[in-house]
Image: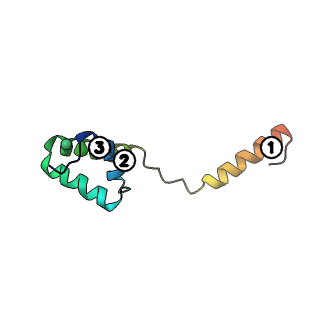
Amino acid sequence: MTGLSHRRVLTHINALLDEALDPVEADAIKQHLQTCPACAAEVETWSRLRAAVKHAYAPAPAPPDLVIRVRAELRRLGEETGAAA
Ligand SMILES: [Zn+2]
């Protein structure tokens, strides 16, 4: 055991996956994961979940004429309301 509680590991999963932990803490957690299949499985689950979410919400490339269409729409709206677009 490394002295880290499961709870401490679990509350740091996202920071760990974001690589936002300080190196000492990250090492301690990684050591815990090597000796704790339960926490390792939890991290694996989170890692997959995050990958899936990231994939699902990956921004689609903007169509090349988007700026032109937005400007045209703004102009149209400006003409409708009488405001300068
Ligand atoms: Zn654990």
Give the foreground label among 2 and 3.
3
Q: CA distance from mark 3 to mark 1?
A: 55 Å
Callout 3 secondary element: helix
Q: Image quarter for residue 78?
A: top right
Specify the label residue 64 is tagged with.
none
Question: Which of the pair 58/4 is nearer the observer?
Answer: 4
Task: Find out whether the residues at labels 3 and 1 contact each other: C-beta distance under 8 Å.
Answer: no
Return the residue at label 2: 55
Return the residue at label 1: 78
- Amino acid type at circle 1 is Gly
Residue furthest toward the bottom? 23
Give the foreground label among 2 and 1.
2
Q: Is mark 1 within 8 Å of ligand 1?
A: no
Question: Which of the pair 56/65 is nearer the observer?
Answer: 56
Return the residue at label 3: 8
Image x and y of residue 8, in percent: 29, 43
Left or right: where does residue 63 sit relative to residue 40? Answer: right
- Number of other residues with Cα within 10 Å of mark 3, as a class: few under 14, some 14 to 19, many 20 or more: few
Callout 1 secondary element: helix
Image x and y of residue 40, in percent: 19, 46
Q: Give the mark, 3 or 1, whose residue is nearer the N terminus.
A: 3
